[in-house]
Image (cartoon, rainbow, N blue to C red):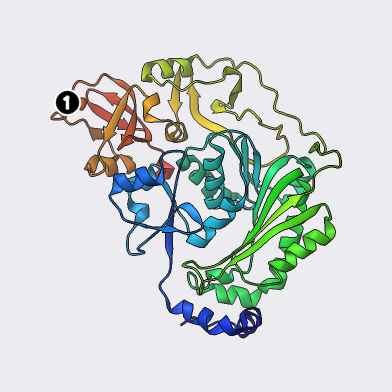
Amino acid sequence: MIDFPQKFLDEIRTLLGDEYDAFIKSYDKPMNYGLRVNTLKTTPQQYLALTGENLRPVDWNELGFYYDGSQKYTKNPLYHAGLYYIQEPSAMRPAHLLPIEEGDVVLDMCAAPGGKSTALGARLKNTGLLVSNDVSASRAKALLKNIEFFGIKNSLVLSEYPKKLADIFSEYFDKVLIDAPCSGEGMFRKKPSMTANWEKFGPEYFGEIQRDILLNGADMLKPGGYMVYSTCTFSGYEDEGSVEHLLKNRPEMECLTMERLWPHQVDGEGHFCALLKKKDTADGSGGHGRAVSQYHFTEPKGIEAFDDFLKSAEIKEVFDRKRLVVQRDSLYYFPEHMPEIKGLHVIRNGWYLGELKKKRFEPSGAFARALDMSQCGHILNLRLGDVRVVKYLKCETIECDPQNPDEQNLENGWYVVCVEGYPLGFGKMTSQTLKNKYPVGWRW
């Protein structure tokens, strides 16, 4: 039994009235576990057909499914191929509520570890621009890994304070998501130790942080743009109170909907979401704030080794040459709408393709993850039950199967290693032996 703080119980009783007892009893139920399918790589129907699983769908997100918590879904090669993201079912709601359209310029303000950003990136379908930010540089690195696992090409990952972003990106974004730091009342079952943190800090402490972030978020939203504010807490001070503070201080903002997912009403740990909109300009033009300089693209030089790599590995991805950018021997493919980002703490700018080393090119894991197998000529495609899949994910050398007609007499050179047709990473073939090039930091 969770030792709830009395002050928390008193507020819940005030909020819920007759439903209070049902709320308390809901904590006797098992935890809810969920996964969300990555539509950059597959569909829910294709995923279920591939795995043969009979998973129950999440009501508020058609890409989400419940699974039994006894199963280790992170120990599945399909997870490492980026086919799905492990996410608590309630937490799937905020990104789903934001009305994303292809080509949007989107900000995920408090993005780590990446659940919402990966959902937003999948909905953008590698169009427009996804700016994912977290003030913690260490957490932003975990965010980057998840974005690269998902095969998202059009991202900019930053680690900055909201105020600094607002000073640069005035009325720049079409859509903004703020899943704000909070007292975490919806985390009490998952992490009972959170109750001690709640007693130390509490809603008042986090409410002040949220109010500041919300005002900065509104200032970065274009007229006519949409913003979702969400928390995993039930506090009226942090939830409705923060929205009221925003509307009072930014009268150009309006609240369209507010909703709560309560753990006694749904199969989830709970979440609060508010969908907000910035009123359009008087002439309906949408307008912009202070102009943000776009990155000045120039034709890259010294990338012959990259061209040679594409040819030898028979990779058919079509690149807009001017968007290939070399920075300190690293090669990136920048999004079309890449802004000028001088002075910001950048974790990753664009799609990281690999390293230019003298007269050769060393491809990255992120390069492979964002490819489709149909774009690759040199392929080593392994079945899900093949023991070599895990060996590859453990960064071990693997041998071709002489009994498999598809693996006989493979020519030397770079290969994309796939599981069931989904790219995992690169390897270099020499005499039927594949030297492993899977990123060490991603090792199983």
Say what secondary structure mark 1 lies in. helix
Above or below, 320 against 23 in this view is above
- Identify the residue shown where x is 66% and y is 30%: 337
Q: Where is residue 92 in the image (x, y as percent from the top left)?
A: 52, 56
Q: Where is residue 393 in the image (x, y as percent from the top left)?
A: 33, 42
Farthest left residue? Answer: 403
Q: Quadrant of residue 131?
A: top right
Farthest front residue? Answer: 283
Q: What residue type is labelled 1?
A: Pro
- Residue 131 left/right relative to 351: right
Report the residue marked by disc 1: 405
- Residue 310 left/right relative to 169: left
Q: Which of 122 and 61 is in front in this view?
A: 61
Q: Where is residue 183 in the image (x, y as percent from the top left)?
A: 63, 69
Q: Is residue 334 visible?
A: yes
- Identify the residue shown where x is 55% and y is 25%: 329
Q: In which quarter of the image is residue 66?
A: bottom left
Q: Position of residue 160 (x, y in %)?
A: 68, 48
Q: Quadrant of residue 324?
A: top right
Q: Nearer the viewer, residue 333 or 103?
A: 103
- Number of residues whose C-alpha sits closer than 10 Å to that of mark 1, classed few (under 14), some (14–19) or many (20 or more): few
- Residue 262 left/right relative to 150: right
Farthest right residue? Answer: 282
Q: Is residue 208 visible?
A: no
- Residue 400 left/right relative to 165: left
Q: How many labels does the image show?
A: 1
